[in-house]
Image: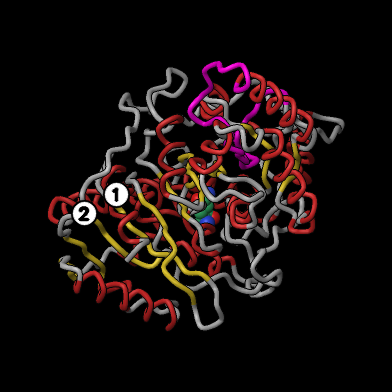
Amino acid sequence: MLYNSLQAIQSDLFASKITVRQVVEGYLQRIEEKKRLNVFLEVFADESLQTADALDKRIADNLQVGKLAGLVVGIKDLISFKGHGLTCSSKILDGFEAKFSATVVERLLKEDAIIIGRQNCDEFGMGSANKNSAYGRVLNNIDNSLVAGGSSGGSAVAVQADLCMVSLGSDTGGSVRQPAAFNGIIGFKPTYGRISRHGLAAFASSFDVIGILSKTLEDNEKVLEVISGKDNFDSSSVSNAFKSADKPTTSKKLVFFKQVMQSEGLSEDVRKQFQDKIQQLKEDGHKVEETDFPLLEYLLPTYYILTMAEASSNLSRYDGVRYGLRENDNSLEHLYKKTRSQGFGEEVKRRIMMGSFVLSAGYYDAYYTKAQRVRKVIKDKTTELLNTYDFIISPTAPGPAFKADKIKSSPIEEYLQDIFTVHASLAGLPAISIPLGKTKENLPIGFHLVANEFEEDALYSFSKYLVTL
Ligand code: GLN
């Protein structure tokens, strides 16, 4: 039996029409059938069934159960779950076991969600196609020759293919939203600080957020309610936990950028679908305006300079001494070099080197400091816009999922995938990708909305209306 929402599962659970064990068994069976997609790096089969049995017993005994009872969740292999493997899809962490659980994991478990396994992704979250994994690429379930999107590609395909109901991914520059778009599901990135990062392996700490992938907005929202809010283990987390509050959809003011529509890589299909949606919105009484946003061309360079700088610092901890892989050699320096040379993949190495370069004496001001300043300008201009408009809208990515062999030579081509999503990450704002429609080839595309800080409730409410428009 396949369920499309947590509410549907829970109503059958509480009416004794089904057991949690049966729900979990269903997922485990599909995971087995879809093994070739390479979504899960590890499945916690026995443990999930044990948790299910314990939960079934409590339900049978009429005892109180948590808000997420019956929800089967997958976690990206960047999120710690005590006693379970954690590799960040990297060889450098091969065999490493998490010593503690991420706050999000603790909160999910407390509300009786079942964590079914950890999901393949781009190494340390760096990539847009899920090809940069030491454990092989994730296949797109709609068409296996296409990429899954990235970096939370496994997490998105898992939801699309019904291998779990919700996934937790991480989003530094679009890693939840872009794969959601490529797989026709919902991908949500919270305001920076809304969800604790404790237990999320760091890529670029001032950008990283944990995000939620799901088929319905209601499930997405419910999970946010549970995992958001202050956490003493993350000093950047904020005190206000999210509380869903459906706001009536009155006439809204939306804005999109001229430069997005003129963007070179934007596919005709995506442009057309986006324009049609704008038309529909206008006909339904909303104000949709085009504006000039000359900063668009600075978004990617600023994002990549800053995230590479932060990554080079964050990833210095993987030295062969403290975690995972250790390539022994005759001196400590050689041990570092050998371990890091053999443990990291090509893209991660590229970023560490570029990041070290932009932070090096002599170039620091020219790149790092300048990018910090540009980030501030981007943030201020964006906030200014969001004081006038409710949402900034765009397609989520320039095109649909592409062929896995398309990006070969230049990493720039892959970086261009993030052109529309990095904006919200640079500004620390909440954003969501919802299914927009399909291309002529029947591939899903995403519609992207950005809201002002902590306006997740408005984002969800409007998205609920939009998916029915
Ligand atoms: N694709 C982007 C990158 O490679 C975004 C990654 C992410 O959000 N983790 O940096």
The answer to whether 462 appears left or right of 70 in the picture is left
Q: Amino acid at mark 2?
A: Thr
Q: Secondary structure at mark 1?
A: helix
Which residue corresponds to the image point at 55% horizontal and 77% vertical from the top-left? 442
Find residue 227 and report its horizontal and vertical position in percent: 46, 30
Residue 348, image x and y in percent? 63, 50
Tell me the quadrant of the picture where the C terminus can be found: bottom left
Seen in the image, is 180 located left or right of residue 273? right
**330 or 420: nearer the eye?**
420
N-terminal of the pair, mark 1 or mark 2, is 2
Ligand 1 closer than 8 Å to the CB at disc 1? Answer: no
- Indicate how the structure is coloured in the image: secondary structure
Q: Kindly identify which residue carries mark 2.
A: 249
* 345 vs 443: above or below: above
Number of numbered discs visible in the structure rendering:
2
- Residue placed most toward the observer, 77 or 42: 42
- For the residues bearing labels 1 and 2, Cβ distance under 8 angstroms: yes
3D distance between C-alphas at marks 1 and 2:
7 Å
Q: Position of residue 455 (x, y in %)?
A: 26, 42
Dominant secondary structure of the residues highlighted in magenta in the image: loop
Q: Position of residue 344 (x, y in %)?
A: 71, 46
Residue beneath disc 1:
461
- Can see residue 23? yes
- Quarter of the image for residue 402 reads bottom right
The residues colored magenta run: 59-83
Residue positioned 47% across, 41% down in the render: 208
| 157 is within the stretch colored magenta | no
Q: Is residue 290 left or right of residue 262?
A: left
Q: Residues within 10 Å of mark 1 (few under 14, many from 20)?
A: some
Q: Residue at x 49, y 44 (%)?
A: 212
